[in-house]
Image: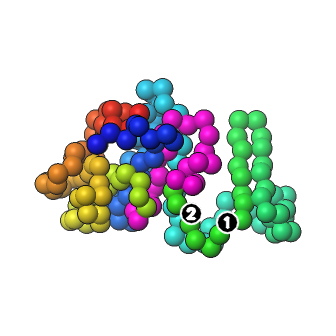
Amino acid sequence: MNYNSQPMTPIVSIVGKSNSGKTTLLEKLIPALRRRGYRVGTIKHHAHADFEIDYPGKDTWRHYQAGAEAVLISAPGKMALIERSPATVPPVTELAGRLTNVDLVLTEGFKLDAAPKIEVVRAARSRQPLCAPADLVALVTDLPLDLAVPRFGLDETEALADFIEHTFL
């Protein structure tokens, strides 16, 4: 299936059980796609509402605690935006629309969202995918799973990057 007819930036979700290797795969996949000249943005799904990326006592933390709806911190070469959001996680397409200047958005998690999914199934964590085969565009695994989707080994990063490039970019 070819998704590059979408009018927006392509989104691909890397999904799998906790500790299956999703972050490790992204750490390899992002530089592989960057070497090909693509600008990659990422969105991480976090299951708990209490995460912090700011530190108590810092100016930006104090601004937020004082009631600011949004706090943006900017420095040469880096910036971050912290803003209040609804109690439910918005759809990944809405979140991805906030990322600019990227050619591809890779998400980690979002297994229930409608975005195309590549599932990581590592024998040490699971014997079967979480997602139904119809919901997957590819599988990254060290198991001999026989599903009707392209299958890549855990270390086949370049082949997976080829697949993503040809399918989505």
Marks 1 and 2 in Cβ contact (< 8 Å): yes
Query: Where is residue 161 shown, x and y percent of the image?
Result: 35, 36
Seen from the viewer's position, the closer of residues 67 and 167 is: 167
What residue is at 51 percent from the left and 56 percent from the top?
92
The C terminus appears in which quarter of the rendering? top left
> Image height check: is 132 above or below 98?
below
Quadrant where the image shows the N terminus: top left
Q: Where is residue 153 in the image (x, y as percent from the top left)?
A: 24, 45
Tell me, yes or no, if residue 139 can be seen here.
yes
Give left or right: position of 80 versus 129: right
Graded by Cα atoms within 10 Å as few (under 14), some (14 to 19) or many (20 or more), the crowding at tag 2 reads few
- Categorize mark 1 by other alpha carbons within 10 Å: few (<14), some (14-19), many (20+): few
Element type at mark 2? loop
Range of residues picked out in magenta: 93-112
Secondary element under disc 1, as helix, strand or loop, is loop
Percent from the top left, x then y, of residue 100? 62, 40
Please give left or right for residue 131 compared with residue 109 in the image: left
Label 2 belongs to which residue? 90
For the point 33% across and 51% down, the residue is 118
* Amino acid type at image mark 1: Ser
**Residue on which the image places disc 1:** 85
Where residue 90 sits in the image (x, y, percent)?
56, 63
Disc 2 residue type (three-letter): Pro
Residue at 77% over, 44% down: 74
